[in-house]
Structures are given as C-alpha cells and as structure tokens.
Amino acid sequence: MSQPHAEQPLLAHLIELRTRLLRSIVAILVVFLALIYFSNNIYDFVARPLLTQLPAGTSMIATDVATPFMTPIKLTLVVSLFVAIPYLLYQAWAFIAPGLYKHERRLILPLVVSSALLFYAGMAFAYFVVFPLVFGFFTSTAPAGVTVATDIANYLDFVLTLFFAFGVAFEIPVATILLCWTGVTSPENLRKQRPYVIVGVFVVGMLLTPPDVFSQTLLALPMWALWELGLFFARFYVRKDEEPETGTQVTKEGS
C-alpha cells in the first residue's frame, strides 16, 4: 500500500535534511583531518595570550597522563567546527531557501553571511582584546609565594567558554533583526526596553563568562553596542502586514 500523498513531501524533506546533516559532519571531519597534524601548533597559538603573561621561568603544566595528547586533539576538533561554520550555514540556507518567498531570500542571505562574520569577530575580539587583559590581571594578582602554573586542559576549557560566549554574543544584531522581521516585536518596542536590555546584557555577561568582573564587562559592553547596531538595521527588516499568496513562493521538488 502506498503512503498518503501528504506524507511524501515530509519524507522528502526529512531525507534532504539527513543528507545536509551528513554533508556537514563530513565537512567537519575533512577539516579535522587536515588540521590534526598541526594540533600542537594550534594549541600553542591559543595558549600564547597566557604564556606571554606568565612570570619568567614558569610554564603551563599537564596533570594527567593523556592530557598532553588529548587536549590539542580536542582543540583541533573544536577549531574544525568553527572553520566549517560558513559551510554549515550554507547547508542550512540551502535547506530552507526553497520554501521562502523571493524577497525573503534576499533578506535572509545577508543574515546568514553576517552570522558567520559576527561569530568570527566575537572570537577575534576575545583573543586579541579580552585574553591579554584578563590573563594579565589574573597573573599579576597572584599572592606572594604562589607560582602560576595553569593546567593545559583547564586553560582550554576556560578559553573555549570565552570563545563561545563572545561568538554567540556577537550574534545579537542578527537576533534583534530576526525578532523584528518575524513580527515578535518592533524597533519601537525595543527602544522602550533599552534600560532592561542594559541590565540584561550584564546579567548574561555574568552567566556566560568566568566569575570575574573584567570578563563580564568586556562581554556586556560589546553586547550592548551590537544590540544598538541590530536595532538600527532592524527597521529595514520590519515584517509586512500582507504577504503575496501566489506566484512568489518556490516549493521543494520531489514528492
């Protein structure tokens, strides 16, 4: 017995979704295999902001037998995911684009591109601005007689948390635009909520960063600035009250 006609498009969409997920996983693995030989060099690059701040004669340590091997490998896998983000976003875009109106596709494509660029900008801000300030402060405040010798696995967890926090935080303009575009709110309503947003970004900065006021402030201030940037561009993405019903939507092939 053949399946109902209504189930065919859904099945086709699920098959396409599976295909694009598999392509994304393969892309990450390909990047990982290309970078694994340089895993120690990648870790050295990521550890440089701390190493330059350590007192003379000190270094990072490994407190577990497998840590010197597993920690660079873990970092390389995460870096592979970050490097593959443009391709992953392309797969997501290719999956949803056929179901969008023509004018929606013109609006979504810049958001997809800017999402990747903003995520990378957040990571770069964390590495070049936040890390030197935070590590310089931490190492300079060590009590007398205490030798600063950070475990490489703990350091990796710390910096990955900051990378992810700043990468996601820099997506605020995209999130703000999407909220206005989907009709959840409007630029006028968001402007009225500005005092609450200012308090909220500091709360989020406290939750996403390690427990120190420097990391919190260095995340909260860019989040506020990016929210203002998203609010500025949101006026170009205000949802229209009426959408054309025929002749403008592209449906997926296959049933």
Image (cartoon, rainbow, N blue to C red):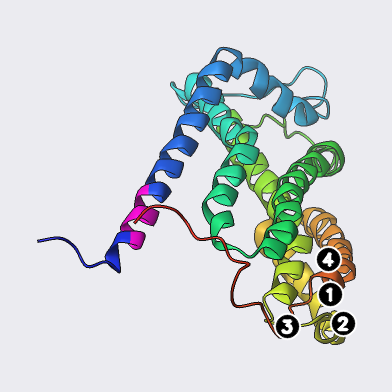
Counting residues from the start of the chain, the first of labels 3 and 4 encountered is: 3
Q: Do the residues labelled 3 and 4 touch (CB within 8 Å)?
A: no
Residue 198, numbered circle:
1
Give coordinates of residue 40: x percent, y percent.
Answer: 61, 16
Q: Do the residues labelled 3 and 2 touch (CB within 8 Å)?
A: no
Looking at the picture, tell me which residue is in the foreground, 203 or 187.
187
Counting residues from the start of the chain, the first of labels 3 and 2 encountered is: 3
Q: Residue 25 lies in what quarter of the image?
A: top left
**Would residue 75 be counted in the magenta stretch?**
no
Counting residues from the start of the chain, the first of labels 1 and 2 encountered is: 2
Disc 3 residue type (three-letter): Thr
Disc 4 residue type (three-letter): Gly
Q: Could you say whether the residue bearing mark 4 is in a helix, strand or loop? A: helix
The stretch in magenta equals: 9-15
Q: Distance between the residues labelled 3 and 2?
A: 11 Å
The structure residue drawn at horizontal position 56% and vertical position 48%, both measured from the top left corner, is: 94
Q: How crowded is mark 2: few (under 14 residues within 10 Å), some or many (20 or more)?
A: few
* Residue at numbered disc 4: 230
- What quarter of the picture does the C terminus occupy? bottom left
* Residue at numbered disc 2: 191
Q: How crowded is mark 4: few (under 14 residues within 10 Å), some or many (20 or more)?
A: many
Q: Nearer the viewer, mark 1 or mark 2?
A: 2
Q: Residue 216 lies in what quarter of the image?
A: bottom right
The structure residue drawn at horizontal position 22% and vertical position 67%, both measured from the top left corner, is: 4
Q: Are marks 1 and 3 in contact (CB under 8 Å)?
A: no
